[in-house]
Amino acid sequence: MDLDFITKTFLRLLAALPLTLSVWFLCVTLGALIAAAVTWMRLSGVRPLELFARAYVTVFRGTPLLIQLFVVYYGLASLPAVRASFAWPFLREAFNCAVLSLALCTAAYQAEIFRGALLAVPHGQVEAGRACGMSRLLMFRRIIFPIALRHALPAYSTEMISMVKSTALVSLVTLWDVMSVALKIRNDTLVTYLPLVLAGAIYFVVNYAIAAAFLALERRLTPHLKPRPS
Amino acid sequence: MDLAIFGFGKGGWGLALLEGAAMTLLVSACGLLIGAAIGGLIARARLSGRLLAGAVGQAYAALFRGLPELLVVYFVYFGTSTLLTETAHTLGHEGFVGVPAFAAGALAVGVISGAYQAEVFRAAYLAISRGELEAAVSVGMNRTLMTRRIILPQVLRFALPGLGNLWQFALKDSSLISVTGLTELMRVAQVGAGSTHRPFAFYLGGAVLYLVITIATSRVFDIAEGRATRGMRRAAS
Amino acid sequence: MARKFVRAIGLGGALAAGLALAPMAFAKEWKTVVIGMEGAYEPWNLTDSSGKIVGFEVDLANDLCKRAGLECKVIAQDWDGMIPGLKAGKFDVIMDGMSITDERKKEIDFSKPYAASPGSFLAPKDSPLAEAPSAGKLVNLDKDAAAGDAAIKGVQAALKGKTLGVQVSTTHANFASQYLKDIATVKEYKTTDDRDLDLKSGRIDASLDDLPTNMATASKPDASELAIVGPKLIGGVFGTGEGMGLRKEDADLTAKFDKALAAAIADGTVKKLSEQWFKVDMTPQS
């Protein structure tokens, strides 16, 4: 195995990285929007909405992502009703199905993170805000959100990294991400380990970068928790 | 939807799905146990105070938290057979040394789970009151007795919530082992979907079975936690 | 501490000695042969509802093994792990509708072919492939270059801007990547079942696979709008027929099977099995 082969393999894998990252970015963003809605339902005080939100979280956290992905990609496409509906042009594309399925899954985990973070806001601060005559929106913007954000950051960082790892599953629904290119190289050249090792290195670097970025964000937002200079 | 395909008669996949569910439970449990062994080792390494051991432990944990689970499954699956066969060859044995898909799958789940279990065990150990350990030493307990009667029971008690969470992850990671051909629940659903051309029914049915397993086993962990933390003062429930 | 170390060395040494003294076969006396099949490549091999693998190749394997005086066992293996599994020793023979190609001959040896099935396209009845040159006819890319060129150009025109589905690591995937790379979108699937699901739902516009396999898919009740369209291609990148795959160092086993196969072809057994499973005689002619 020569350096030329290693370089060529590595470049082929890198060429698939934009697809992996775009799936990740889109699913995480869409997931955040869905999670915000689910969290709002959960904390709304309206019983049916609360039950729906709890059921949503239980279902999407309690089943493997792989089977969710197959339900969306293969399952929905096999239903004549779906094929005849307005959603079909969207669901026909493997990329859209993958993003949708991953977003639904991460939304459940993100909803739990949001819920925990919101419940961690000290009630005294909310009361003080109300006593000052702040509107609900102003209170959310200036008190609740900033405090909840700082509580959510560590768990959110873990979830972001978890979703990068989950994008590897889209290789099983005909998308050419880093994982599927690595497997194709492996099948075509019968080189056992190298493509997987290089793919692993790429995923590892991406995850490390995300972890470092979130750590930097945490440090900036919570200077009062930094270790005191000794 | 024609529910007969899930039945137990001829041409019915009900039995196959249940067998797949049993396989899922088995491989996840074995994976969790392997993970406990690995996690315990890493936790010990990191708590030992020895720099090199601690660094190796941290590197292992960082590595397996940063790699996609699917990649680890493929790597362990392709790697164990080749490794074992080549090792046997250098020792003079001819022929193929096979690692069954079950073993490779449980190992993959365990290797990943171990990285997270290390943190759970480490935190659980640090939560043990120092006073108890000092008292044990002063009474003259040797290391083994102390481990058996004081450390292990308390570590298990504090680790239960974290372990319950990691068990759920092991269950979900076990679905990835389907790519190696092991007939656990995901694989059976896939074969059934392909064979009968009814993907929606089979994947939804499989998801329902996973949900049932998840809810049932999380109840078991809740009961275990309740019994284990009897009399403990807790910050929140 | 030292005691533990010594104990470990002792155990390791005993293990090594035990393995080294295990009986080693110097010349392989073939008694039992393990055959790898997908069990998901109808009608070559498929898994019935009781979990048993059946199909053309199972019946043929049983017949050939009887003639060669061997006991044969069939195990299931995913397609993309076939050649690595053979080379690792997981099984001794591959029988999975595997085409004999020069590319594969670099890695493994083949027996003489037991079938010569062309590649064919499966698509909705109104696909443009139905109007392509040589539609419905058998074109040999090795023997008739001119007709082959025209057929390929016709396929390229019919599939321009469309999506074609193939199984990974097959001659069909090679054809698609060689001739349709920038013309059509090519989707590769791990199993033919997954690809057929996407063909039925309309995600892909056509699928390329062996003729018997496509015929089996088209004959199912839920495939009424699908039909075999376009030219049937053999030779060239499609290989020269399907044969058993064996390791290069097992030339004696290959010879055994070649002898049995020649006898099976001569007395019409292969033709009978072919007509039974493929509905058409696929026995190689030369």
Image: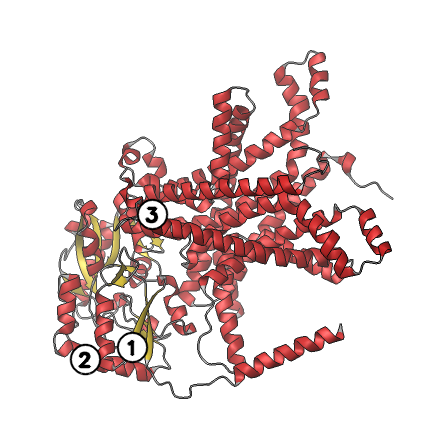
Label 2: which residue? C262
Residue A150 in the image, given as x and y percentages of width and height? 68, 33
What colouring does the structure picture have?
secondary structure
Which one is closest to the eye, mark 3 or mark 1? 3
Q: Amino acid at mark 3?
A: Gly
Q: Disc 3 sits on a residue from what chain?
A: B
Which one is closest to the eye, mark 2 or mark 1? 1
Label 1: which residue? C71
Residue A80 visible somewhere in the drawing = yes
User: Decide: marks 2, 1 in contact (CB < 8 A)?
Assistant: no
Which one is closest to the eye, mark 3 or mark 2? 3
Camera-side residue: A39 or A217? A39
The answer to whether residue C213 is left or right of residue A187 is: left
The answer to whether residue C28 is left or right of residue B168 is: left
Q: Disc 1 sits on a residue from what chain?
A: C
Q: Amino acid at mark 2?
A: Ala
Residue C184 visible somewhere in the drawing = no
